[in-house]
Image: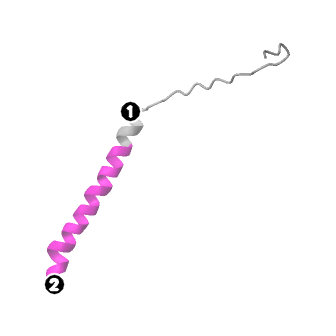
Amino acid sequence: MDDPTKSVDIEKKSIEKRMDSGMVASTFIKYAAYVVIFFGFLYFLIRYVLPMF
């Protein structure tokens, strides 16, 4: 069963998870600003533009 000429190569992959907290925080702030601007625009439309019709 075991063939001494048979060679098996095992490849190990080491995955390191790097988390730059500064990058995560700046991305969160950016998307939070997008959400605030979007809801501000919706508020403007509902409050000022919609009553004109």
Segment tinted magenta in the rendering: 27-51
Residue sitting at the far right: 5
Q: Is residue 4 left or right of residue 30?
A: right
Q: Is residue 48 magenta?
A: yes
The quadrant the N terminus occupies is top right
Residue under the point 35% across and 49% down? 30
> In the rendering, at what x and y percent does residue 13 appear?
61, 26
Say which of 40 and 17 sits in front. 17
> In the rendering, at what x and y percent does residue 20 appear?
43, 32
- Amino acid type at mark 1: Ser
Provide the secondary structure element on which disc 2 rests: helix
Colour pattern: one colour
Q: Quadrant of residue 51?
A: bottom left
Q: Residues within 10 Å of mark 1 (few under 14, many from 20)?
A: few
The quadrant the C terminus occupies is bottom left
Residue sitting at the far bottom: 53
Count of numbered circles in the view: 2
> In the rendering, at what x and y percent does residue 27 appear?
38, 45
Q: Is residue 48 left or right of residue 10?
A: left
Task: Identify whether 36 is placed above or below 53.
Answer: above
Q: Residues within 10 Å of mark 2 (few under 14, many from 20)?
A: few
Dominant secondary structure of the residues highlighted in magenta in the image? helix
Query: Decide: marks 2, 1 in contact (CB < 8 A)?
Result: no
- Amino acid type at mark 2: Met
Residue of label 1: 21
Q: Is residue 10 left or right of residue 19?
A: right
Provide the secondary structure element on which disc 1 rests: helix
Q: Which mark sits nearer the N-terminus, 2 or 1?
A: 1
Q: Which mark is residue 52?
A: 2
> In the rendering, at what x and y percent does residue 24 appear?
39, 39
Residue under the point 32% across and 56% down? 34
